[in-house]
Amino acid sequence: LGKKVIHKQSTPSTQIIAHQAAQENADHGTIIIADEQTNGRGRMSRSWHSAKGKGIWLSIILRPSILPYLAPQLTLLTATVLADVFSSYTNTEPLIKWPNDILLENKKTAGILTEMQAEQDQIQYVVIGMGINVNQENKELPEDIKDKATSLAIKTGKHWPIKEIIQEILITFEKAYDSYIENGFPEVKEKWESYGFKMGEVIFIKTLREQFKATFSGIADDGALLVKEKNKTQKKLYSAEIEWFK
Ligand code: BTN
């Protein structure tokens, strides 16, 4: 992992560069890093603020030999990697909000965007993009996310060396990935659930079709959210937003 690193000072999105590189046969483990993204993208066609030198804007190209429907496992794995790294850098215990927002004291510090190219039952490649707010001060966070977002600097009161954190993430990622390929999903799932925000609690769920209250009972092997409404059988959700009661 990281034998080849493509570094851009400024780019619309490291995801775009990663797709191009992967289509030109870039190796498994190729990393794309940018100091700044001018059109960073998030999940659900949202944009992702990626100011110069303020955070880690990075995409990893993977070529795993797993079935395409299991690709969400890689997103969940990445979330546990970031949570592990954050817990070693801060004194706060990070939590992962399903599917893959890393929270510090209930505010989003990092997000993950996984995109895949697959044909029939075979993955050509997966691009895992991570956006991590590192050195923004509160006043530097965009107005629309100020209430819900934070950075490592805001949480710890100090400036962090970006390169060192990238290295730590890549080392931790490689270990977790190798162990996942060798031992499968159970240990990733266990770790994810140990960081799971509101695990076992009653949450408010919004999907495109409905909204309801249910207990968050865990995650499934395909990455789905498992919830149980009172007196009903367990449901699997693939696309939903979690809200909670304060
Ligand atoms: C989300 O929480 O919605 C996911 C955010 C993912 C942002 C990262 S930054 C590096 C990579 N390039 C992008 O354009 N997006 C991802």
Image (tube, grey):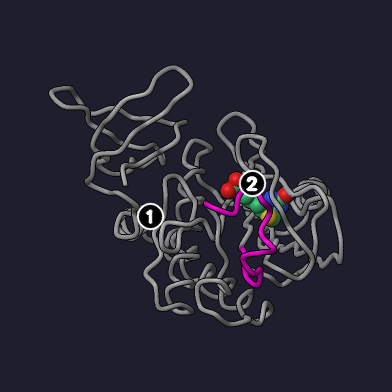
Query: Which residue is depicted at the point 58% across and 82% down?
Result: 158
Residue hosting label 1: 184
Indicate the secondary structure of the residue bearing disc 1.
loop
Query: Which residue is depicted at the point 45% across and 58% down?
Result: 103
Name the front one of labels 2 and 1: 2
Residue type at tag 1: Gly
Image quadrant in which the N terminus is located:
bottom right
Q: What is the span of residues highlighted in magenta in the rendered image?
A: 133-147
Image position, residue 165 (x, y; %): 60, 77
Query: Which residue is depicted at the point 36% across and 37% down?
Result: 225
Residue type at tag 2: Asp
Instruction: Report the front residue among 37 and 183.
Output: 37
- Viewed as shown, does residue 52 lie left or right of 41? right
- The part of the image, by quadrant, that contains residue 192 is bottom left
Residue hosting label 2: 144
Depicted 32 relative to depicted 155: above or below: above
- Viewed as shown, does residue 180 lie left or right of 167? left
Q: Is residue 213 visible?
A: yes
Q: Is residue 113 visible?
A: no
Magenta stretch holds residue 87: no
Depicted 88 relative to depicted 72: above or below: below
Instruction: Report the front residue among 16 and 37.
Output: 37
Q: Residues within 10 Å of mark 1 (few under 14, many from 20)?
A: few
How many labels, in total?
2
Query: Which residue is depicted at the point 41% across and 41% down?
Result: 223
Image position, residue 148 (x, y; %): 52, 52
